[in-house]
Amino acid sequence: KQEVTQIPAALSVPEGENLVLNCSFTDSAIYNLQWFRQDPGKGLTSLLLIQSSQREQTSGRLNASLDKSSGRSTLYIAASQPGDSATYLCAVTGPGRRALTFGSGTRLQVQP
Amino acid sequence: KAGVTQTPRYLIKTRGQQVTLSCSPISGHRSVSWYQQTPGQGLQFLFEYFSETQRNKGNFPGRFSGRQFSNSRSEMNVSTLELGDSALYLCASSLGRGTSYEQYFGPGTRLTVT
C-alpha cells in the first residue's frame, strides 16, 4: 500500500528566505507526482505535475524535483513571500491506483 | 475558462439524514473524482467517474455513492449520515484518465453533521 509522508509538518520562515519542502513515498512505481497548495478552508490549487519519467518541473518561483528510485520529491520555493503561507500537499498516482494518494501536508507560514 | 464548481458550499445536516453534493467539472473535462478531507484522516479518495461509469472506488461504506451525467457533471450522495461524515468534500476533474493529466480541484463542500 502506497504511503506518502511530508516533513516537516509545519514550517515558519521570514520573508525572502528560500525553502524546501519534502515528500517521500514508499512505492517507487508511480505514474506521476503532483504538488498542491491549500489555503485554510479552501480547495486545492495545483502547483506542479511531474511525470515519472521527469526529474523536475518549474513554475515561476517554484521548482519541484522527483527522484523516483529513492521515493522522494522536493518542492523548492525561492524568495518566499507572506502570500505563500498555506498548506502544501504532495500526492502520487500509481499502477492499480489512479486516484491520488496524499501526504498529510506541510503548513507553511512566511513572516513579513 | 471557469474552474471546477461545487454546490452547495456549506451544509448542515442531522444524523440519519441523507445529502447530495454536486460537482461541475471544467468544460471539456470528462473525469471526475471525489475526495473526503478530515483533520484526522487527511485526504481520502472516494470514487472516480469517467464517461458516466464508476472507474475506481475507495475504501468507504456503501452509504457513499455517486453518479456522473452525460455532460460530465457529477453528484455524490451520502445516506444515513453519521457524525464522522463531517468533512470537506472535494471534487477534482481532469481531461481524461491518462497519467499525464493534471487534476484540478473545486473549492469543496463543507458538510457538518450534528
Image (tube, coloured by chain):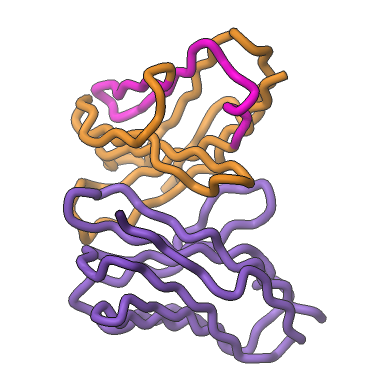
Chain colours: A purple, B orange
Q: Residue at x 47, y 67 (%)?
A: A5
Quadrant in which the N terminus of chain A is drawn: bottom left
Q: Residue at x 37, y 78 (%)?
A: A72
Residue B52 in the figure: left or right of residue B7: left
Residue in front for this viewpoint, A76 or B70 = A76
* Residue A32 x %, y %: 27, 65
Q: Does residue B19 lie above or below A79 as drawn? A: above
Q: Does residue B103 lie above or below B107 as drawn? A: below
Residue A11 in the figure: left or right of residue B108: right
- Quarter of the view holding residue A106: bottom right
Quadrant in which the C terminus of chain A is drawn: bottom right
Residue A101 in the figure: left or right of residue A112: left
Q: Does residue A20 lie above or below B41 as drawn? A: below
**How many labels were placed on the picture?**
0
Q: Residue at x 41, y 51 (%)?
A: B104
Q: Does residue A16 lie above or below A72 as drawn? A: below
Q: Residue at x 37, y 82 (%)?
A: A65
In the picture as drawn, the residue positioned furthest to the right comes out as A112
* Residue B71 on the magenta span: yes
* Residue A39 x %, y %: 64, 57
* Residue B46 on the magenta span: no
Residue in front for this viewpoint, A33 or A46 = A33
Magenta residue span: B64-87
* Residue A50 x %, y %: 30, 72
* Residue B28 x %, y %: 27, 41
